[in-house]
Image (cartoon, helix red, strand yellow):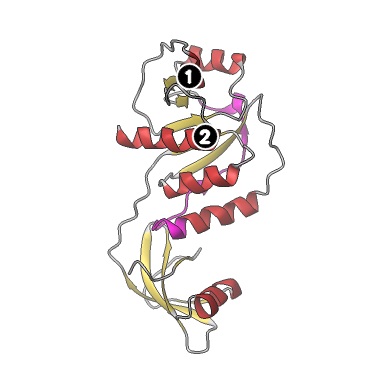
Amino acid sequence: MQNIPRIFLNQNLDTGKIFAVDKDVFHYLHRVMRRNDCLVFNNGTEYSAHLSDDGKNIIIDAKTDHVDPANNIILYFAPIKKIEDLLNMATQMGVGVLQPVITERTVVHHINWTRQQKIIIEASEQSNRNSIPELKNPIKFDALDLNNLIVADERFAHGKEVKNKVIKSERILIGPEGGFSDSEFDKMDMAGVSGLSLGKTVLRAEVAAAIAISKVLDE
């Protein structure tokens, strides 16, 4: 089934249900893939489906036994220039929630979040997920709950000792291109935020996110 197109439908799916086909979905299936069968998914479940004879509807067939590979990780991240790469990688790695956080050194403020939602859906379809991560509205750093939080701490790359004990958590924080400010690090240190070392080199934020997620998944 790996060659069958996968489509996210923002509907309550069940065998026998019929939904009107979006024109983009029809074009993709009928014109690009040249087939009328596909897999559809939402809310952790996947179904076989097919286009109606007139091409106007999609008909839901049997539920598959495919298990959603998504996880419960919450990724808190400062918006960056290559935000599409970050969201794409995080989605492919199964992240459950995506929470933008505006930090003192965040320089990217005008983001088309509707477009980013489309990027997330496409990454979910491609990566064999049965769900899409929840993309939340941006919050300011001062509104962030620092309890039980792991931060990808670039201070390790500069040889600074970080004393907070590494904890097991599914809440990960990634900073902006310019890193966190001293005052933000002070607040995190006082709150006992756990610093996660990503090695001795300073990484781009989108790369740091992927490695941090991988490390947490390996715990």
Q: From where the camera sits, is residue 115 visible?
A: yes
Element type at mark 1: helix
* Residue found at the far right of this picture: 110
What residue is rendered at 46% in x and 56% in y?
124
What residue is rendered at 63% in x and 54% in y?
115
User: Considering depth in this image, is 208 or 216 the residue closer to the camera?
Assistant: 208
Q: Is residue 132 left or right of residue 186?
A: left
- The residue tagged 1 is 157
Task: Answer above or below: position of 129 versus 176.
Answer: below
Tag on residue 83?
none
| Magenta-colored stretch includes residue 118 | no
Position in image of residue 26 (x %, y %):
55, 77
Cβ–Cβ under 8 Å for marks 2 and 1: no
Tell me where residue 106 sits by quadrant: top right
What's the residue type where badge 2 is placed? Tyr
> Mark 2 or mark 1: which comes first in sequence?
2
Position in image of residue 111 (x %, y %):
68, 44
- The residue tagged 2 is 76
Element type at mark 2: strand
Q: Which residues are magenta?
A: 124-145
Dot 2 alpha-carbon crowd within 10 angstroms: few under 14, some 14 to 19, many 20 or more: many
Position in image of residue 218 (x %, y %):
31, 35
